[in-house]
Image (tube, rainbow, N blue to C red):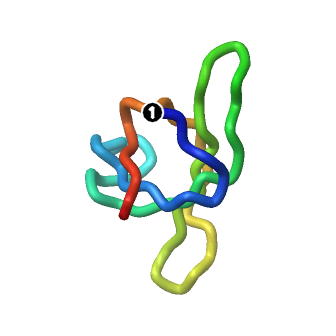
Amino acid sequence: MQYKEFQIIRLKKNILSHNLKKGDLGAIVHVFNKPRLAYEIEFINKNGSTKIQLALTSDMIELVN
C-alpha cells in the first residue's frame, strides 16, 4: 500500500535507537519515490513539539483509520 502526505500512521515495530515504540503515532510529511518508496514521518511528544522525524519504509507503519 502506498500512503500519502498528511496521513496519520501507527508504528508497527519498536525503534529503540530513537526511543519509539510499537503503537506510537506519527504523520507522513513527505513521500520518497526514489531510490525506493519510503516515508518521512514526524512523531510528536505530548506537548505537541517534534520528538523526531525520520524516514521509514511501509513495512514499519500502518494507516490509522
Give left or right: position of 2 versus 6: left
Where does label 1 land, which residue?
A: 1
Mark 1 neighbour density, 10 Å: few (under 14) some (14–19) many (20 or more): few
- Residue 10 in which image quadrant: bottom left
Q: Is residue 36 left or right of residue 10?
A: right
The residue most toward the top is 35
Where, by quadrant of the figure, is residue 33 drawn? top right
Residue at x 55% of width, y 64% of height: 51
Position of residue 41 measured from the top left corner of the image (x, y, whole percent): 58, 50
Q: Quadrant of the N terminus?
A: top left
- Name the image quarter holding the C terminus: bottom left
Residue extending furthest toward the bottom? 47
Answer above or below: position of 23 versus 37. below
Which secondary structure lies at badge 1?
loop
Q: Residue at x 68, y 38 (%)?
A: 31
Give the percent coordinates (x, y) of residue 27.
Answer: 56, 59
Please count the marks in the image: 1
Across and down, in percent, residue 18 comes to 45, 47
Q: Which residue occupies 49% across, 30% down?
A: 57
Instruction: Using the image as rendered, state which of residue 64 and residue 23 is in the foreground.
Output: 64
Q: Nearer the viewer, residue 37 or 47?
A: 37
Tag 1: residue type? Answer: Met
Q: Is residue 55 above or below residue 7?
A: above
Residue occupying image coordinates x 30% and y 53%: 21
Q: Give how far across and how far down residue 29 sits, in percent.
A: 68, 53
